[in-house]
Amino acid sequence: MSRRVVPVSTLIHYLKEYLDSDPVLHGVMIEGEISNLRKPYSGHWYFSIKDEKASLPCVMFSSANRRVSFDVKNGGKVVLKGDVTVYESEGRMQMLVSAMQPSGIGDLYLRLEALKKKLSAEGCFDAAHKKPIPPYPMNIALVTGNNTAAREDALITLKKRWPVASLYEYPCPVQGMDAAPRIIEALQKADANGHEIILLVRGGGSLEDLWCFNDENLARCIYDLKTPVITGIGHEIDFTIADYVADLRANTPTGAIEAAVPDIMEVKSVLNHYRVVLETDISHKLKNAREQQRRMEGHPVFQDPQRLFAEKAMHLDYMSEKLMHFSVRADRERVGMQKVFQKFERLMHSHTNQIQSVLQLSETRMIQAMKHHKMIVQNNLSVSEEALRRNIMLPLTDSQKRLSQNAALLDAYSPLKILSRGYSITMKDDHALVSVDEVNKEDNISIRLSDGTVYANVYDKEKNHGRNPDI
């Protein structure tokens, strides 16, 4: 086996992380019938949701089930919202239910689930498309309802955590039939104004109250924005389509501010640390620079600056005198070199003439040698051609003679030659007969003569017994 062996717990933990990282399985909505309902003293609910083909274990913690406003019992048909995960201790897939509604509002859940699957298939939720959040934003846009609790929470948290930032508000309705187009308009306006980050927040509410944030056009608008978007819609258990397509999702409006900006106290602490480090480094460098300055001040050059160029001036004078001496010598050598070049030119001209004479003589001798060699080769070819002709014609004549002898011998022993002396060949069914036993009365036979074939019918037959067949 090429794969390594792993413990059961490792495999179950891998499956749990795989399911937990799938955005389609977060906030999933399913409809079915409750069965095996248990309500222990802990306040948590344990049950199964089933239909006619399958069943899924479910857990609804007390913090979530206290918001259920109807009587929950076995056999009741409900719509659940929650996350699909794995219970590691038992290796069982289950659903952590965050909301429960009677089956009457199932159409909204089904529409939400269908839209979530559609946008997920198009890649609108992919992490690769998420834009990075700036670590220290100073220009922030806030898109939310006017005079709402979510707005007040956001303003208070921002003033406490990061008061140095500038906040620009884009108020719009966050509930109702016409809310989605107004939210889109506010987002596009904020995106065009070049803010570093956009916060889209709203307080908690029912599925119907938050339905405008499940609008498909709003989701595509958030996907196309150039500015990073952080959402803080509803409570921790509430997930909308806008949360999935945003660059970062926070659980509440306050959480959106905390995710968007740093804590100024922490930033000041970090800056103070860097300031101390920087001051220490600068102090150390200044100390080294002063020490180097003291060493340089004691150098002889600084005590007597003329020493720095006195030796250079002497060397310059020496080089000037040497250059003048070299110039005079060069003039003398130039005259001598002209004479040498003239003599060399005469020698080269004489040597060139000698080489040309030698080349002409060599060319004449080479032409004569090539002509002589050509005649020898032609004579050798003529002799070889005659010998080859004799060696070919002699075996050919012998072969023709043997062929004529063999043809005469074959003709002498040919069966057709015997037919010309009065003999014949009797055949039945293309088979030569050698005995009367091979034919019966009324058989059709053919008789081959020297000049043709006779076709006959057997009238009778007689076999020789002890008599000479040649008589």
Image (tube, rainbow, N blue to C red):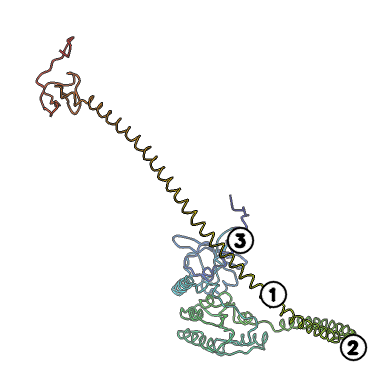
* Depth check, front residue: 106 or 261: 261
| Measured Cα–Cα span from mark 2 to mark 1 | 55 Å
* Quarter occupied by the C terminus: top left
Which amino acid is tagged 3? His
Q: Is residue 56 left or right of residue 339?
A: left
**Residue denoted by label 3:** 13
Q: Is residue 20 above or below residue 373?
A: below
Residue found at x 68% / y 86%:
160
Residue furthest left in the image = 459
**10 Å neighbourhood of mark 1: few (<14), some, or many (≥20)?**
few
Locate residue 387, reporting x and y percent.
39, 39
Residue 148 percent location from the top left of the image: 57, 87
Which residue has dot 1 on it? 340
Among the two numbered marks 2 and 1 on one chain, the one whose residue lies closer to the N terminus: 2
- Residue reaching furthest top? 466
Three-letter amino acid code at the position of disc 1? Val
Identify the residue at horizontal 56%, vertical 87% (top origin): 194
Helix, strand or loop at disc 1? Answer: helix
- Mark 3, secondary structure of its residue: helix
Secondary structure under badge 2?
loop
Point out the frontmost of discs 2 and 3: 2
Q: Which residue is mark 2?
A: 304
Where residue 394 appears, as percent x and y from the top left, is: 35, 35
Q: How many marks?
A: 3
Q: Earlier in the sequence, mark 2 or mark 3?
A: 3
Q: Amino acid at mark 2?
A: Asp
